[in-house]
Image (cartoon, grey):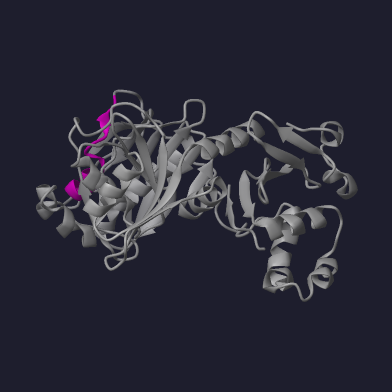
Amino acid sequence: MAPKFDANEKSGAQEESGTVSPGDALNIITPCTKHKYERVACACPRQWLYLLGDEGVVYSETRRRVAGLDAAGVSAYRAFDSGAGIEDLRLAGKGHGPDAASGAALNAIHTLTQGIFPDDESEDGSRADWPDHDSSISVQSESANIEIHGIPISVVYPPGPWEETCRDCFRNCAASDKAARWRLSARLAGNVWGIYINDRKVSTVQYEQQLGLGLMHAARSLLYAEGKYDVAFHAAMVASVHCGVMFCAPREYGKSTLAAYLVTQGFDLVADEPALLDLDTSFIASLRMPICLKEGSWRNLLQHWPQLANAPVHIRSDGTRIRMAHLSNQKCSPRSRPLTHIVFPCYALSSSAEVELLSPLRALGLLTEGGMLLAKQFALEDFEAFLELLRRTPAYRLQYASLGEAHRMLYEIGC
């Protein structure tokens, strides 16, 4: 019964006052004939419940947050939104199974009707108030002006032996002759390095081998905050002539390794985190960034990527060793590509091969768990267009024990 997941136009009574009384909220049901689902105006201002069969999705236009509900969760949400209390539902559900009796689930759904989403204390990805870049400040270290997704950035590399390691993270990025609005730099203070965007510290790293990834993460934060997109995913994207496949998963699930392997099998790389979606076109933007490969995948990819043997080693914050796979211009897609398939990979050496077709609601939940960010100006019609994209885009969970096996399974589902 608990909310399944969480991520980041008014009708009827809301158009006049911006709010709906609890007694009236669930009477305002708008059939979305264009997108084939129903939209329910909630008592919480600018919050909506979308009904997809027996299940539902709650979307807050003000918070840019999403939560999915199973059938029991939808029933509880509608009761709370009509004015019922937690004890009312506890008494009504007594003796009707573990879901109905779950106090924690009821509490979570009750707070959801008030606009409070699970893990609301977490960072929502909104742009930090970074100071402007002062180009008049002289820089003693080596720097490079690059462009990522149309954003001109000046990267100031630390002097000394770690300069080349840091350059390794931006080797594929196009040089820019535009005036940089953002400056990424690493500065040593005592025994700790600070990573800065302009003159604001955004993170710290303890070891020099973490500097390159620290600067790369700062660049990605700029993409999330300043890039042009509607939805950003923690995902990799590859494309062929006939399809564009986005691999979305948390760390350690093998999405970057699978993307690197598929590039050797005829696919082009579109992006390796983030994957930036334009809803008007359903295209994912092309990003010229390297593929980050953790140590466990080096041996499997070495025959396809022999340069990995001598590539610089980067250290992630959790101690994982990373090497970068740099693609030639021929293997990097020079343009955005249409999203035709969504795949949630799961590599497990001793597992049997499994392919599972997912419902749109399940796909939305996994996208959120994998890392999903809605744009700052994400409006109600954008969310409905996103739901429609998920409805028409096939999504699969793939479990596999080898890269070759994953490739075969992708071929079987039409990739």
- In-image side of 79 versus 360 (left or right): right
Q: Relative to 165, is 33 above or below?
A: above
Q: Residue at x 37, y 31 (%)?
A: 149
Q: Which residues are magenta?
A: 163-176
User: Furthest-top residue in view?
Assistant: 177
User: Quarter-wise, where is residue 334 in the image?
Assistant: top left
Count of number-bearing discs:
0
User: Furthest-bottom residue in view?
Assistant: 95
> Residue 53 location, x and y as percent?
66, 47
> Residue 226 location, x and y as percent?
47, 35
Is residue 122 a member of the stretch shown in magenta? no
Closer to the camera, 80 or 402? 402
Closer to the camera, 380 or 156? 380
Q: Residue at x 54, y 39 (%)?
A: 391
Closer to the camera, 183 or 266? 266
Q: Quadrant of the N terminus?
A: bottom right
Q: Relative to 349, is 265 above or below?
A: above
- In-image side of 315 versus 63 (left or right): left
Q: Quadrant of the C terminus?
A: top left
Q: Residue at x 43, y 37 (%)?
A: 276
> Residue 220 location, x and y as percent?
39, 43
- In-image side of 303 versus 359 (left or right): left
Q: Relative to 120, is 350 above or below?
A: below
Whether residue 197 is visible:
no
> Residue 328 location, x and y as percent?
17, 34
